[in-house]
Amino acid sequence: MEQRKRGRKLLGNRKRHHNIMLRFNDTEYEKLKQLCESYQLDISKRGTVSPLLRRLILQQGAAEKDRLPDTSNLAYHFNKIGNNINQLVKLAHHKNLRSPNSSLHNEIQKTNELLYQLLEIANEEKLG
C-alpha cells in the first residue's frame, strides 16, 4: 500500500508572492456574501473567498471599453494650467499694487471735470 502525502500541495514555481488586501463596506460585503452563496461557499471559512475572486478576475479579461484611460499626461497638463493661472494672478496683483486705482482715478477726474462744467453752466444761467 502506498503511503499518502499529507499537508499542503506544493506549488513549485506557481507559488504566489504578491499580496493584495481588499476592504469592503457593508453593502459591498453583502454583495460578496451573496456571490459566495451563489457558488455554495461559506464566506466565514478561511480560504474560500480568495480562490473565488482569483478565478473570477483571471478568467474574465477586461474589455477595451472598461479600461481606464492613461491620466498621467492629463494630470501634467492640469498642473501646467494651474501654474499659468498662478503666474497670471501674481502679475495682476503686482500691476495692481503699482497703481491700485489708476482707472478709478481717471474716472473720478472725468467726473470732476463734468461737474465743474455743470457748475459753470448753472452759474451762467443764474447770472444771465
Image (cartoon, grey):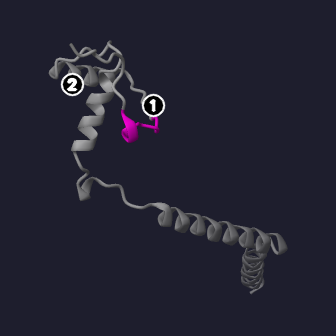
Residue displayed at 32% across by 13% down: 45
Q: Does the magenta stretch include residue 75?
A: no
Q: Distance between the residues labelled 2 and 1?
A: 19 Å
The residue labelled by disc 2 is 35
Give the image location of residue 42, x and y in percent.
Answer: 25, 14
Chief secondary structure of the magenta portion: loop
Q: Which of 12 and 51 is in front in this view?
A: 12
* Dot 1 alpha-carbon crowd within 10 angstroms: few under 14, some 14 to 19, many 20 or more: few
Q: What residue type is labelled 2?
A: Leu
The disc label shown at residue 21, or none: 1
- Residue drawn at x 78%, y 76% is 102
What span is in magenta? 11-19
Give amino acid for label 1: Met
For residue 125, what is the image quadrant?
A: bottom right
The residue nearer to you, when weighing 51 against 101, is 51
From the viewer's perspective, tell me whether residue 25 is left or right of residue 65.
right
Looking at the rendered structure, the secondary structure element under dot 2 is helix
* Above or below, comparing residue 28 to residue 46 in the picture: below
